[in-house]
């Protein structure tokens, strides 16, 4: 238990070094029943079954760093009113981060033979991350008068990444029971939309409120048709074939690494790093860049004198040229959202375990960290449930739940990092859930017990013969 | 049995999950729209006097001297008449009682006291009659009717048709003919010859000049007046004046007369007055009502145009009082008179190109003093821009480089002229004139900053308005003592911004 406390303290310190915690994450797979999807987050994890076939499982999640819905949505009868003033007040001073992810494991097979483990998997990932500076929300909702003699940052960042993953997992357990694992993944990019630079601001001068707009804004889009700004359609599907096919030219390698260290019979430490790699976008990849500065000081009366009216065309042209995006075909690469997990588990009793973990994820310059403690309880071999309490450094408190129901070889599981929204859906700023089914065959313990029994029987019979 | 319990437990958990989530179904979400406050610049303009005068419809021309001092000149055509209108040629005839006659014609005291008559159009009619019973070839020559540098001859046949008398009527076009009357006579002769070459005298021969239109006439022209023509000139800069005065120093009124009527001529005006927009009038006092002689080309200068410039200033007229009356319109009758002194010793020339043209130039050096000079102009107003405005605060910064104090007021009015609100407190809204030196030149600009708050009450008032009336009041620095000079590079800057609170509602 001392070790657990030590790990917990260490984890807390590590958490404090994280500069910001802002993304939606999935923590529970790391410590869930290792016969379920544990090796998703740690390729070094060895389960209890010789063969695991992962049937489709789906994870969907949402996270924002600033508010719970019930803090900004007031319910009256069957109507919810969004109180923008309250929302703005609660938005983090650094801005509002919003992330919505989805991950589908379409199929996977893992086989353990002795101290070796090998597996293949296929999955589809969709990661959407939006950052809105607080001043942008204040500006757009309340107008610019609150920013007189100030520069309002309007640099909204939007990052969308969608790709397919084909993985090959290899695991090895050393004689001392320490196991290591590697998952090599060939990722095929489906679509990417990322904000490479996001300078967009408006300065309101105090004299007569002259406005200076500045942009240095670059969007990189890959795997999608060229953006069509001529006839108002978002994408020009006629010029391009649409979203990339199942596999294509936009691809890249990535790796997961893991280690599991059984300290003794009670304590197990494990760590993993996921998604070390990137996707290179070379097909249907575009850069949209806007860079300029426009000063609007007010209308000049001279055209009124010369032509009898003031034309807004010139003004609009100037504004348009300031915010005009120049398009170029340009390849780029997208780093995958890399994740670091470290945790410890203490086996209190045979069917009861407790643990602690640290989670950290980084994507597009935004880091997400969490620290949590957990407890797992098995009810025979049929039902296993667990819960964890995790603190995100943005201040969000999460009470998670994991559960798996085993009916013969069919294993149904559900994991969530935050179960409270299930009972009070508006009382959350973070929610995710993974549900799925896998098939498990060949209980290794039973096989080993049988082998030991058979071996003992042979020994007994041999000794009987001897006797 | 334990497995059954755990399955029931799992199903129970799933049930709780689904039932809680279903609570969110059928819920509408709306937004509590509130107010936005925007701060935007509206006007940021620096106007020089050149900008304004180049583009304002003053109707005048701006003349800028090297030192940028300006003079505004209004020009207008007052009068134009054609000289040939004073010449009228009656039809006349000459009896030819023998084969050669010389008939006295024209001269002093007659209506045809001409020396030469260039004929542009007209008809020569020759009539002849004889009882001679055979065909005769007749050639009639008018010795002082010249065509192609030779006397004019008319040839015709007296065609005998077995009955008497034999008659001939011949008409000839006299275009491009010159009738030389310098000897005050017309000489005509003819021959009538039969086929054997024998000459005869005809019983009757007559020559008539009909419908003569001259292209040029030289001779004596009696005193004669051209009809007076009425017209007016609008002085735009004064048309919207509602009060106050602008006093201009040293204005001038010039008549520029171009004349190529080769006869002594004078121009004359029986009526020349100014009206202001209050309906008041002031007569122009000058020698014009007595008639003023103008230059004219001599007989040897037929194609030349003689120009006469007649200038009126404060030494020979009341033009300064007239302009400082700030007229919006100058009304006049203008005419001309030839040979006003009836000098019958003067021979003159008039052609069909001769005319008298009078242009007027009203020269106003922009060197003035103004005292509460007020201009008002009313326009339609669309108040829908205020629909969602809760309140607004206008910020006006003006920097005045003009030697003129300006007060601007905007009145919001209903259709029947009721004022429902005004934008400024006019008494506090004067933009001070730039400082001038003793010679009226600007030495220091002035700056003023003011805030105008419009709350919901005032905006509700303005929402009733359909028209906006702009009232501008101008006074020069030390108006009573110093006239200020205006140069084209004088500038005035207006910077106007607004902070407006807008009500946002769900559409």
Image (cartoon, coloured by chain):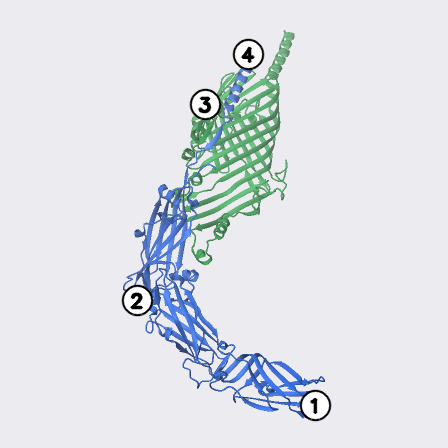
Chain colours: A green, B blue
Q: Is residue A452 above or below residue B64?
A: above
Residue B187 place in picture, x, y as percent: 57, 89
How would you rate the neighbour count of disc 4 (Cα within 10 Å): few for under 14, some for 14-19, many for 20 or more?
Answer: few
Discs 1 and 3 lie in a common subunit: no
Q: Is residue A296 left or right of residue A194?
A: left
> Residue reaching furthest bottom?
B198
Q: Is residue B439 left or right of residue A115?
A: left
Q: Which residue is mark 1?
A: B194
Secondary element under disc 1, as helix, strand or loop, is loop
Residue A254 place in picture, x, y as percent: 57, 35
Q: Please tell me which residue lies in front, A285 or A309.
A: A309
Q: Which mark is residue B439?
A: 2
Secondary element under disc 3, as helix, strand or loop, is helix
Q: Which residue is mark 4?
A: B2
Q: Is residue A11 left or right of residue B369?
A: right
Q: Please tell me which residue lies in front, B441 or B214.
A: B214
> Residue reaching furthest top?
A467
Secondary element under disc 2, as helix, strand or loop, is loop
How would you rate the neighbour count of disc 3 (Cα within 10 Å): few for under 14, some for 14-19, many for 20 or more?
Answer: many
Q: Residue at x 44, y 34 (%)?
A: A20
């Amino acid at each position: 238990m001392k070790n657990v406390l030590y790990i917990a303290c260490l984890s807390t310190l590590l958490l404090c070094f994280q500069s910001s915690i802002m993304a939606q994450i999935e923590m529970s797979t790391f410590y869930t029943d290792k016969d379920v999807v544990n090796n998703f987050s740690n390729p070094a994890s060895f389960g209890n079954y010789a063969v695991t076939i992962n049937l489709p499982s789906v994870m969907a999640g949402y996270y924002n760093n600033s508010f719970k819905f019930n803090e900004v949505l007031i319910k009256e009868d069957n109507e919810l009113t969004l109180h923008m003033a309250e929302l703005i007040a609660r938005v983090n001073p650094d801005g509002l981060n919003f992330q919505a992810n989805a991950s589908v494991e379409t199929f996977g097979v893992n086989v353990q033979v002795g101290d070796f483990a090998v597996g293949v998997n296929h999955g589809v990932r969709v990661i959407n991350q939006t950052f809105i500076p607080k001043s942008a929300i204040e500006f757009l909702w309340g107008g610019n008068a609150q920013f007189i003699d100030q520069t309002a940052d309007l640099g909204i960042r939007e990052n969308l990444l969608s790709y397919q993953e084909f993985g090959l997992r290899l695991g090895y357990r050393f004689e001392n029971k320490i196991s290591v694992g590697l998952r090599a993944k060939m990722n095929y990019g489906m679509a990417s939309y990322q904000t490479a630079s996001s300078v967009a601001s408006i300065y309101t001068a105090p004299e007569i409120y002259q406005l200076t707009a500045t942009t240095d804004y670059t969007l990189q889009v890959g795997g999608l048709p060229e953006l069509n700004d001529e006839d108002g359609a978002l994408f020009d599907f006629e010029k391009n074939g649409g979203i990339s096919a199942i596999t294509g030219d936009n691809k890249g390698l990535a790796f997961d690494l893991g280690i599991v260290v059984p300290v003794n019979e009670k304590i197990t430490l494990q760590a993993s790093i996921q998604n070390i790699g990137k996707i290179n976008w070379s097909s249907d990849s575009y850069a949209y860049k806007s860079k300029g500065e426009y000063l609007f000081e007010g209308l000049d009366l001279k055209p009124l004198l010369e032509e009898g009216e003031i034309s807004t065309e010139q003004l609009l042209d100037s504004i348009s040229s300031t915010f005009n995006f120049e398009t170029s075909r340009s390849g780029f690469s997208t780093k995958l959202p890399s994740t670091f997990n470290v945790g410890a588990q203490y086996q209190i009793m045979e069917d009861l375990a407790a643990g602690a973990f640290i989670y950290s994820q980084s994507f597009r310059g935004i880091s997400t960290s969490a620290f949590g403690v957990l407890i797992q309880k098995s009810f025979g071999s049929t039902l296993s449930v667990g819960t964890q309490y995790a603190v995100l450094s943005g201040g969000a408190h999460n009470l998670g739940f994991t559960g798996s129901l085993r009916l013969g070889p069919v294993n149904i599981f559900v994991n969530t990092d935050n179960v409270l929204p299930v009972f009070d859906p508006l009382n959350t700023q973070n929610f995710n859930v993974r549900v799925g089914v896998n098939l498990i065959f060949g209980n290794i313990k039973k096989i080993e017990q049988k082998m030991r029994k058979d071996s003992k029987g042979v020994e007994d019979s041999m000794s009987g013969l001897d006797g | 049995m334990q497995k059954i319990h755990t399955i029931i437990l799992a199903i129970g958990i799933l049930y709780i999950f689904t039932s809680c989530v279903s609570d969110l179904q059928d819920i509408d979400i709306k937004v509590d729209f509130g107010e936005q406050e925007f701060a935007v610049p509206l006007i940021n303009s620096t106007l020089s006097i050149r900008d304004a005068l180049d583009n304002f419809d003053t109707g005048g021309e701006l003349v800028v001297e090297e030192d940028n001092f300006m003079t505004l000149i209004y020009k207008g055509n007052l009068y134009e008449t054609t000289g040939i209108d004073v010449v009228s040629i009656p039809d006349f005839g000459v009896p030819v009682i023998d084969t050669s006659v010389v008939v006295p014609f024209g001269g002093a005291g007659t209506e045809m006291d001409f020396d030469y008559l260039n004929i542009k159009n007209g008809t020569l009619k020759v009539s002849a009659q004889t009882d001679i019973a055979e065909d005769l070839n007749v050639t009639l020559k008018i010795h002082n009717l010249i065509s192609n540098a030779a006397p004019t001859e008319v040839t015709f046949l007296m065609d005998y048709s077995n009955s008497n008398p034999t008659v001939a009527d011949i008409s000839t076009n006299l275009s491009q003919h010159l009738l030389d009357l310098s000897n005050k006579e017309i000489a005509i002769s003819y021959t009538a010859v039969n086929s054997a070459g024998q000459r005869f005298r005809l019983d009757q021969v007559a020559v008539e000049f009909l419908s003569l239109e001259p292209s040029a006439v030289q001779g004596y022209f009696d005193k004669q007046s051209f009809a007076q023509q009425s017209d007016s000139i609008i002085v735009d800069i004064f048309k919207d004046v509602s009060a106050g005065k602008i006093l201009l120093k040293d204005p001038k009124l010039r008549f520029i007369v171009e004349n190529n009527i080769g006869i002594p001529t004078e121009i004359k005006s029986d009526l020349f007055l100014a009206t202001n927009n209050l309906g008041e009038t002031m007569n122009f006092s000058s020698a014009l009502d007595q008639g003023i002689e103008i230059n004219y080309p001599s007989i040897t200068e037929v194609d030349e145009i003689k120009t006469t410039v007649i200038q009126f200033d404060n030494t020979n007229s009341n033009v300064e009082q007239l302009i400082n009356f700030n007229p919006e319109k100058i009304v006049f009758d203008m005419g001309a008179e030839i040979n006003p002194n009836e000098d019958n010793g003067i021979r003159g020339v008039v052609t069909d190109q001769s005319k008298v043209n009078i242009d007027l130039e009203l020269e106003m050096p922009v060197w003035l003093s103004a005292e509460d000079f007020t201009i008002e102009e009313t326009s339609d107003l669309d108040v829908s821009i205020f629909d969602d405005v809760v309140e607004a605060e206008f910020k006006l910064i003006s920097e005045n480089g003009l030697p003129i104090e300006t007060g601007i007021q905007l009145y919001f009015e209903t259709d029947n002229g009721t004022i429902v609100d005004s934008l400024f407190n006019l008494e506090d809204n004067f933009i001070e004139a730039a400082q001038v030196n003793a010679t009226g030149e600007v030495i220091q600009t002035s700056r003023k900053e003011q805030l105008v708050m419009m709350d919901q009450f005032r905006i509700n008032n303005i929402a009733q308005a359909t028209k906006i009336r702009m009232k501008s009041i101008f006074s020069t620095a030390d108006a009573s003592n110093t006239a200020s000079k205006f140069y084209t590079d004088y500038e005035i800057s207006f910077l106007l911004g607004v902070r407006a609170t807008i009500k946002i509602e769900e559409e």
